[in-house]
Image (tube, rainbow, N blue to C red):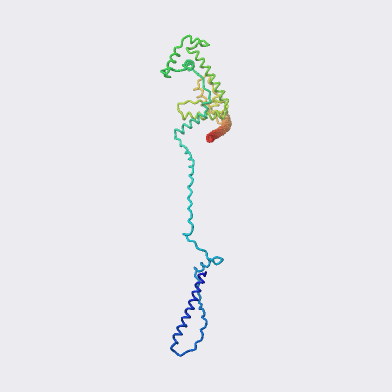
Amino acid sequence: MLTSVGRAAARRVVGSSKAAATLNLDLASGLAGRSPLVLRPAAAPVAATRSFSVSPWDLLAAKSESADGSTKKKTTKKDAAPKKKKKAAKPKAKKPAPKKKEKKVQTPEEQLKAKIKELKKTALLKEEPSPQPSSAWLVYVVENSPAERPKHESFGETTKALKAQFDNLSPSEKEASPHPPQSVHCHFETRAAANKQASAEARKAWISSLPVEDVYAANLARRHLLRLIPGKRFFKLEDDRLPHQPPTPYAVFVKENGDFANRSATEVLKDLGEKWKGMSAAEKQQYEGRYTEEKEAYSTELNALKARAEQKKKEAKAADKAEKLAKKEAKASS
């Protein structure tokens, strides 16, 4: 089977042969009425040649032939088997990300409440031993209060009845005192004095068992609570281990030179004040020099105590944070 190039060449050859035959016939008919001529055999027709160009389409057709001379059949879109459309996979539903808990912003009242709670913890109020009844009236109330108050009777009415009984003690109750009665409430006053002494000893023993930096921090917290809660009393923890601020030079002078046995304090202080003003700088130097040395020692000891108290506070906060985190992890794993 001819290619497009071969077919074009064949058409040109056939066209040139037909033109030569037509020319010979025309010449023969034209010379028929004239004198006879000697006819010579016509030469064999020569194929006319001409140059031709090959179009890009012919080159593409030639390239499409296979090695054995056969052309590949082009498949149209209609002949091609229809491809099955793949169904689009449904996107997997993503799990919603866990919402972060927003930190609650505390109101000023809540902040104050949290601050007071923290200060009370530092002040060691719950660890402090409870005092025993330290007055005759309180002793009587503790010993004579009913175990269960009647429902129809208020606390005020019960207290009023106990007060009336306390004020009208009988002589037989006076004799209950181990000592000769000096007052109507001698027995209960003796008990109250004993309770007061026992409470003081228990409090002192408890303070001595505490580290000195805890005592220092507790006193600072109690001082702060006095400002935050007006009308509430918070007693200072007295401890000899705490650094004490040295007395001023004038206070030392008064202590060493004041004679308060035979004169009033007002007169003695007036005379000592005038005497102190009249002293020279050299005379005051013995008191001022001593005060300077004691103050430096006091500052050094106090700064060291503050550092220990601050370090202990940081350690306590870290321990509380670790404990909360451990509880949270245990709750999440369960």
* As drawn, 37 above or below 253: below
Question: For residue 205, what is the image quadrant?
Answer: top right
Residue 277 visible (yes or no) = no
| Residue 39, x across and y down, in percent | 49, 87
Query: What residue is shown at x 55% (from left), y 21% (from top)?
Result: 202
* Name of the residue lying farthest toward the bottom: 35
| Residue 50, x across and y down, in percent | 50, 77
Q: Along the line of sight, which residue is nearer the eye, 303 or 201?
A: 201
| Residue 332, x across and y down, in percent | 53, 36
Query: What residue is shown at x 48% (from left), y 59% (from top)?
Result: 79
Q: Along the line of sight, which residue is nearer the eye, 53 or 71?
A: 71
Q: How many marks?
A: 0
* Name of the residue lying farthest toward the left: 152
Q: Along the line of sight, which residue is nearer the eye, 165 or 96?
A: 96
Q: Along the line of sight, which residue is nearer the eye, 300 or 294?
A: 300
Residue 14 visible (yes or no) = yes
* As drawn, 188 above or below 284: above
